[in-house]
Image (cartoon, rainbow, N blue to C red):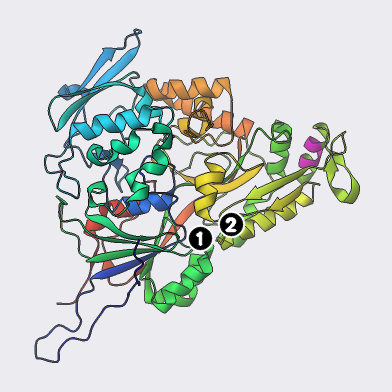
Amino acid sequence: MRIISALVGLALLAAAAPGAPAMAARDQLVIGISQFPGNFNPNIDSMMAKSYVLAMARRPFTAYDADWKLICMLCTELPDIAKGTAMPEKTADGKDGIALTYTIRPDAVWGDGTPVTTKDVVFTWEVGRHPKTGVASSELYERITAIDATDDKTFTMHVNKRTCDYQGINDFDVLPAHIEAPNFADPAEYKNRSAYETDTTNPALWFGPYRVTEVSLGSHIVLEPNPTWWGAKPHFRRIVVKAVGNTAALTANLLSGDVDMIAGELGLTLDQALAFEKRHGDKFEMLYKSGLIYEHIDLNLDNPALADRRVRRALVHAIDRDAISQQLFEGKQPPAHGQTNPLDRVYFDGIPKYAHDPKQAAALLDEAGWKAGAGGIRQNEKGEPLRLEIMTTAGNKTRELVQQVLQSQWRQVGIDVRIRNEPARVFFGETVAKRKFTAMAMFAWISSPENIPRSTLHSDEIPTEDNGWSGQNNTGFRNAEMDKVIDDMEVVCEKDANQALWYRMQTLYAEELPAIPLYFRANAFILPKWLKGVTPTGHQYPTTLWVENWAEEREV
């Protein structure tokens, strides 16, 4: 693929003729992000860097907007029981299912001019439900028992579970059948043979306001306007997304003019942004958005030491999350005691909480059979040391600093923790997705409002080689009660009963601790003062889903 140079600062001096504009319009925007996508197929792996880029070149059927409302993007209208476009029905085994009718936008076409049709929908379903494909979230595809195509644009989806949030099919990422069908001949090899990997700049893969035109792996991605886009004409002739894995270097790129803005979804951490604002804030537009972002440490529960809940609780008691919040983030990123954010309507404050208590941590470790040994490191009856490894994304200075703080605090109670980090592309694409981390993996989950955590907590969602590494239950958490609560949360829609299930789910999570909660994040958007239209959402759907609204504000 051809490498380009990322030209920035294209404000040209205008001609000196009377009445001429002072500056020429900017036709390029360079965005800095801290990670490079692990791949470009919308259904394979889950990574915000990919979501951020693909949102400029694709549109989901349904998504949440900046007001946290479910909306249609690729469809014309949400299905509705009252309107007859959603019809309750019985499944073959007598359970409550539902038939959902959607109509694809009549003007929706792929970048090569081929209409987006129900053939693409049916093909995508075949890919998503195949056990060897390894899609990030196969659960929706598996729930669909049939798809009836009324015509090229209208289809009815038969789903074997009548959920409370039946209207949304946010995870159904449509694929171009006319391009991808030959690549799916061997489903087990589809991940590698997909045109999204082998021919990423093919216009037929894209149908957003922009399309991917150039890729330099690990470096940058170029997007240019898609001539077949049906919506508002995008302002910029070229958008360059530049990946700079070291956040200090990312700041330097912004100050030098090598990038115009730093994305809030994947840019500077809050502490870095606050420090940057004190020094340079007058030169940029600074936006802060608290959201449904949960910084945590996934624990590999197949590790014999971490399989013991007492050890997991000791790990949490040993760390001082309040001090981390105050000293690193000026209290603006509150400590997390569970995975559900206080901003979410379903949040429950009555869950068990584990205060910083090294004495309690030591008592739990003693009870679990880990006694103080040589050099202060605990060991079991076999003489094996309590030694764990923690991993995260290399180059993220805040995460690396948090690792060092945690390492020190765990050392004080006799736990020897070693640090080993990897580039984000490897960390998310291989280590986390395939559960290759031996003990602890620190990263963030970003969710939508009232998002039921099936993919991360249900035992059916544990990635394995047999299921093509599908699912996001990377901890390997298996709990029969949690499985039932999650199953019930989806179908028990009466408000009080549903809320009670949400409370029980959060309580179970806090009791069992399949992950170590750290803090709820806020995102910092650093924008040029001339850029308007960027609206942070506070959830997993990025600002780039509305990139056609971004424009330069100019004096007239």
Q: Residue furthest left?
A: 18
Q: How many numbered marks are there?
A: 2
Residue 168 visible to an observer of this rendering = no
Q: Which callout, 2 or 1, points at the residue further toward the start of the chain?
A: 1
Residue 425, image x and y in percent? 49, 52
Relative placement, left or right, of 370 versus 506 is right
Q: Which mark is residue 269?
A: 1
Label 2 SS: helix
Q: Which residues are magenta?
A: 361-365
Q: Are marks 2 and 1 in contact (CB under 8 Å)?
A: yes
Residue 522 visible to an observer of this rendering = yes
Identified by mark 1, the residue type is: Thr
- Displayed quadrant of residue 182: top left
- Displayed quadrant of residue 308: top right
Determine crowd level at label 2: few under 14, some 14-19, many 20+ residues with C-alpha closer than 10 A.
some
Residue at which label 2 appears: 399
Identified by mark 2, the residue type is: Arg
Tell me, yes or no, whether the highlighted magenta stretch contains residue 228.
no
